[in-house]
Image (cartoon, grey):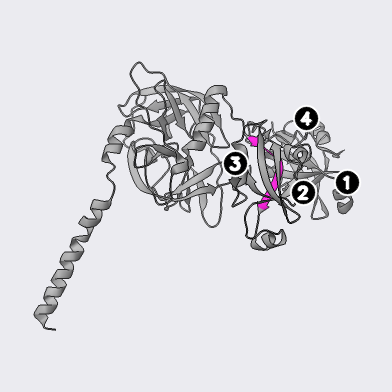
Amino acid sequence: MTIQRLMMVAFGLVISISGLPTALAKDLPDFTKLVEKYAPAVVNISTVGEVARPGRQNPRNGELEEFFRFFGPPGGRQEAPNRRPAQSLGSGFIVSKDGYIVTNNHVVDGAREIIVRLSDRRELIAELVGADARSDLAVLKVSSDEALPVIKLGESERLKVGEWVLAIGSPFGFDYSVTAGIVSAKGRSLPTAQNENYVPYIQTDVAINPGNSGGPLFNLEGEVIGINSQIYSNSGGFMGVSFAIPIDVAMEVVDQLKDSGRVSRGWLGVMIQEVTRELAESFGLDRPYGALISKVFEDTPAAVGGLRAGDVITKFDGRLIERSSELPHYVGRVKAGEKASVELMRDGEMIKMDINVGELADLDANGSRPQIGASGGDRLGLLVASLTAEELERLDIAHGVRVVEADGAAGDAEVRKGDIITRLNHKTVDSPQALKEIVDGLPAGRTVPVLVLRNTSPVFLALRVPQ
């Protein structure tokens, strides 16, 4: 091949490659009209006062970050003398003409005053209608003499992996920033500090950063299909993985908060675990799926309905359970008092039954669940359960209660899940009710001893009673 021919081939290659971006660009979506039409319904949310800052979760090598580090708008606004500056915390969006706004709970949690800033630079004082820590959602209400722009809601159930999505929010206080990407996965389970997972998150690669929290995630039709809530990060900034609350789940919560200021969720009263390949074979399943019940708590809907430890729930209310983490999502969406159909594998046979679903107890002010039965340890951040006669015999003890969860003061004292509390403040603990009575009488601010049985060894711990 001559040099001249080589040059012609190389020149042709350059031409074809240089034309490639133009060809690809024709296939990319145009978000301009969507942004022009719906961006005005997105708001920036600031607060005055202390805001509770949630802890981090550390799965694998990264961190799930709720967006609670925020900065004021670039350049800042001049504040009146003696007025504490408002701190820009996140985003939200208007869902009705009468002024209801949806955002994340952690954006406004603990705020003394909530300020909503619209795209036309109007600032309105918002009232907190209700909030739900489990789903990390909050509903605000503003009043305005002028018409308010409203967002268009979609259906997250119809969302497909690989679909284009777009976010509008205020990352780091930069109002009305627009970022785009695709849906990476659906139904992600991200357990909370209370080890609960009532939200099947949408995972995307949309660039989300602190300040986007509570803002809308749109599809190409301009419909909101999610609420940006968390990021997975080693650095605190965007690393290609972000999570949004599906709008179908969110609006169920929003409607309840608007109606009653609280959220009612279904509850069974079981502990579950994942079904591995080996467990699936041992239980007679043709493949790993379902939720394996490892414990049924006494006097719960599960116990009354006949569920047993060792049952593998494969379908709940008509929905197939592929992973155990899906079960809390489905149970939580059933109204308390209603019946739900359950299909399960028991002793190698598939069984169908109906269960009357109970109501999940509310979280207390510290974000802890009230106790199973009458344990009443929420003052210390304890969740405990009774021991059966067989457990007492196996542990070779006369009394005690098992720790299901330990947060707050109990967690600070290094009380652990699985510990057996036998004595508290020199008094015998033989039931959840006995623990409640002892806890109620503890002097505030004092340090008291707690005796636990840990791995068959007794250990004393020093527990400081909160004020």
- Which dot marks residue 389? 1
Secondary structure type for disc 1: helix
Relative to 60, say whether 30 is above or below. Answer: above
- Mark 3, secondary structure of its residue: helix
Most extreme residue toward the bottom is: 1
Q: Nearer the viewer, residue 416 or 140?
A: 140
Measured in 3D between alpha carbons, the distance from the residue under mark 4 to the one under mark 3, in whole angstroms, is: 36 Å
Residue 1: % across, % down: 14, 84
Earlier sequence position, callout 1 versus callout 3: 3
Q: Nearer the viewer, mark 4 or mark 3?
A: 3
Residue 54 lies within the magenta run: no
Residue 324 percent location from the top left of the image:
62, 50
Task: Assess whether mark 3 and mark 4 are in contact (beta carbons under 8 angstroms).
Answer: no
Q: Nearer the viewer, mark 1 or mark 3?
A: 3
Q: Which residue is mark 3?
A: 330
Left or right of residue 370: residue 64: left
- To which residue does mark 4 refer? 440
Q: Looking at this rendering, what residue extends furthest in the top direction? A: 145
Quadrant in the rendering for residue 36: top left
Question: Is the Cβ of the residue at disc 1 closer than 8 Å to that at disc 3?
Answer: no
Q: Characterize the local packing of mark 2: few (<14), some (14-19) or many (20 or more) Cα atoms within 10 angstroms.
A: many
State which quarter of the image contains the C terminus. Answer: top right
* Magenta-colored span: 266-273
> Tag 1: residue type?
Ala
Callout in the foreground (2, 1):
1
